[in-house]
Amino acid sequence: MTTFDDRERAQEAKFAYDAELNFKAEARRNRLLGEWAAALLGKTGDDARAYAMTVLTSDFEEPGDEDVYRKLAADLAGKADEATIRAKMVELRAVARNQIDDEI
């Protein structure tokens, strides 16, 4: 085994680890977005949790955040504008990443 092979394996492991953390942070952010949107829609309890799950699963439609944004924009029409939704997406991404990092 050479030093080069060891470095390559370490880089691959780090890439996989970072990708997993990113996936978890995105999923957490989407759940948090769903909870925020549910509150704006007046949902509580099980209805709020169920709605948050619909936001979470909307992220599987296509790569990136636009599928989540479109879902929220349609559901929050008249309650939150584009700038508010996008700002909340950025804010909760940082919150989710911090929560994931704290769990490690």
Image (cartoon, helix red, strand yellow):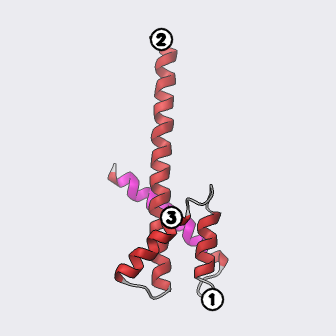
x, y percent for residue 87: 59, 71
Query: Could you classify mark 2 by the number of other residues whose Cα lies within 10 Å: few (under 14), some (14-19), or many (20 or more)?
Result: few
Q: Main secondary structure of the magenta part?
A: helix
Residue under label 3, please give it. Answer: 57
> For the residue labelled by badge 2, is the local secondary structure a helix, a strand or a loop?
loop
Where is 49 relative to 99, above or below?
below
x, y percent for residue 55: 51, 70
Where is 99 relative to 89, above or below?
above
Q: Which of the marked residues, 1 or 2, is nearer the chain's N terminus?
A: 2
Q: Viewer-proximal residue, 47 or 72?
A: 47
| Proximity of marks 1 and 2: CB atoms separated by less than 8 Å | no
Q: Which of the marked residues, 3 or 2, is nearer the chain's N terminus?
A: 2
Q: Which disc is residue 51 wearing?
A: none
Q: Which disc is residue 2 wearing?
A: 2
Residue 102 showing in the rendered view? yes
- In the rendered image, residue 85 lying in the magenta stretch gets the answer yes
The residue mark sitting in front, 1 or 3, is 3
Q: Viewer-proximal residue, 68 or 87?
A: 68
Residue under label 1, please give it. Answer: 78
Classify residue 103 as left or right of residue 57: left
x, y percent for residue 2: 47, 11
- State the extent of the magenta-drawn residues as a range: 84-102
